[in-house]
Image (cartoon, grey):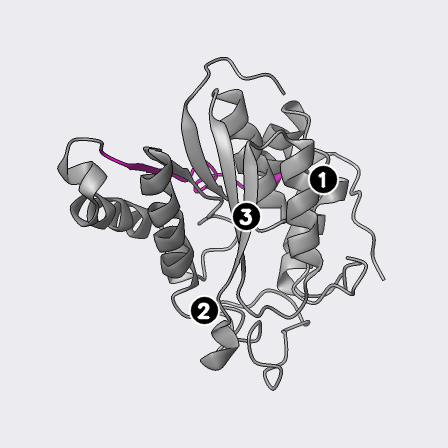
Amino acid sequence: MGSTVSSRPAVVLLSGGLDSATVLAMARAQGHDCHCLSVDYGQRHRAELVAAARVAKALGAASHRTLTLDLRAFGGSALTDSAIDVPVDGVAPGIPVTYVPARNTIMLSLALAWAEVLGAQDIHCGVNAVDYSGYPDCRPEYIKAFEAMANLATKAAVEGARLTVHAPLIALTKAGIIRAGADLGVDYGLTVSCYQADDTGRACGVCDSCRLRREGFAAAGIADPTPYR
């Protein structure tokens, strides 16, 4: 994927899932030199981190780093506490038990730190408030508030280099995200979205993330490349 403008560093939060892969493709298409950040936070499996490395390479990231910050020390989520089961009976209203307390705030803060070191004024993330509006840290008002905080918190911003947090998927449906990524050449077969994928990245097919992903491909009219168990 060619870059139209050189030397425009940006930090992209890259989980290895469908949404963040699309955001990376969008940022690259806008001409950014993309430095991808993944976080090993003690999630149920490492398959998505392996996928993140694949995606970063395939989409021409300038660099990719994985930080370890083990949120199992706190737990409180089905993704960080093995005693809490991942829901498999369909997407229910309300904030689900797969919500990880403060996860996006932690990840955006890490991205902010790296952006300041890189001299980057742009952070890109794949939060979405349409198909999955249960997470409070995926709302537009949250992203706006974090951006305001970031511009009070850094030496770079105080000296005039203001930061922008981009959340280009926030108002898109899952089908819309998939269509946008397909237009940019994203190979979604490289991505892992399942909350409880096996060691090879095969999806369970029944968790909320799997259901939304599968429904998104169907609605987009695009073949689902996901390997299911």
The mark that comes first in sequence, 3 or 2, is 3
Tell me where residue 86 sits by quadrant: bottom right
* Secondary structure beneath label 3: strand
Task: Characterize the local packing of mark 2: few (<14), some (14-19) or many (20 or more) Cα atoms within 10 angstroms.
Answer: few
Determine which residue is flagged by label 3. Answer: 65
- Nearer to us in this view, 62 or 162: 62
The mark that comes first in sequence, 3 or 1, is 3
- Nearer to us in this view, 57 or 176: 57
Give the residue type that dot 3 points to: Arg
> Residue at the bottom extreme?
83
Give the dominant element type of the magenta stretch: helix, strand or loop: loop
Q: Quadrant of the C terminus?
A: bottom right
Determine which residue is flagged by label 1. Answer: 188
* Secondary structure beneath label 1: helix
Determine which residue is flagged by label 2. Answer: 94
Q: Residue at x 63, y 49 (%)?
A: 16
CA–CA distance in space, label 1 to label 2:
28 Å
